[in-house]
Amino acid sequence: MSTRLSPAEDFPEDLTTLDLPTVEVLNSKIHRELDYEYAHDGEPSLETEIRHEELTEELDRRDRRPESSPVLPDVVEPARRSS
């Protein structure tokens, strides 16, 4: 299994059908591919840039969904001394 996703490899047409861990793995592979292309070619391929943008948009969309907002712990007020 490769840690990168080259422009020649298949990429899902609809990211919304994938679970979050799968989208995160794809995002990681695309970032590694971007790093590889910059190091070896001096610039990323258009296909890799497009995939990166699609993944960024999908992750941003998921972050905006109410059910994906982090749960914050209840704020506890510090104990007050009485004089």
Image: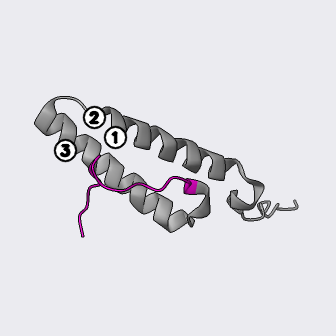
Name the residue type under label 1: Thr
- Per the image, label 1 sits on a secondary structure element best described as helix
Task: Give the total number of marks visible in the rendering.
Answer: 3
Between 71 and 60, the residue placed more toward the observer is: 60
**Mark 2 lies on residue:** 45
Residue at the image point whose x is 82% and y is 60% from the top: 80
Between 31 and 41, the residue placed more toward the observer is: 41
Kindly identify which numbered label has been placed on residue 36. 3
Left or right: 82, with 21 as reference point: right
Kindly identify which numbered label has been placed on residue 48. 1
Name the residue type under label 3: Tyr
* Mark 2 or mark 3: whose residue is earlier in sequence: 3
46 up-or-down from 61: above or below: above
The answer to whether marks 2 and 1 mark residues whose Cβ atoms lie closer than 8 Å is yes
Residue at the image point whose x is 56% and y is 42% from the top: 57
Kindly identify which numbered label has been placed on residue 17. none
* Part of the protein shown in magenta: 1-15
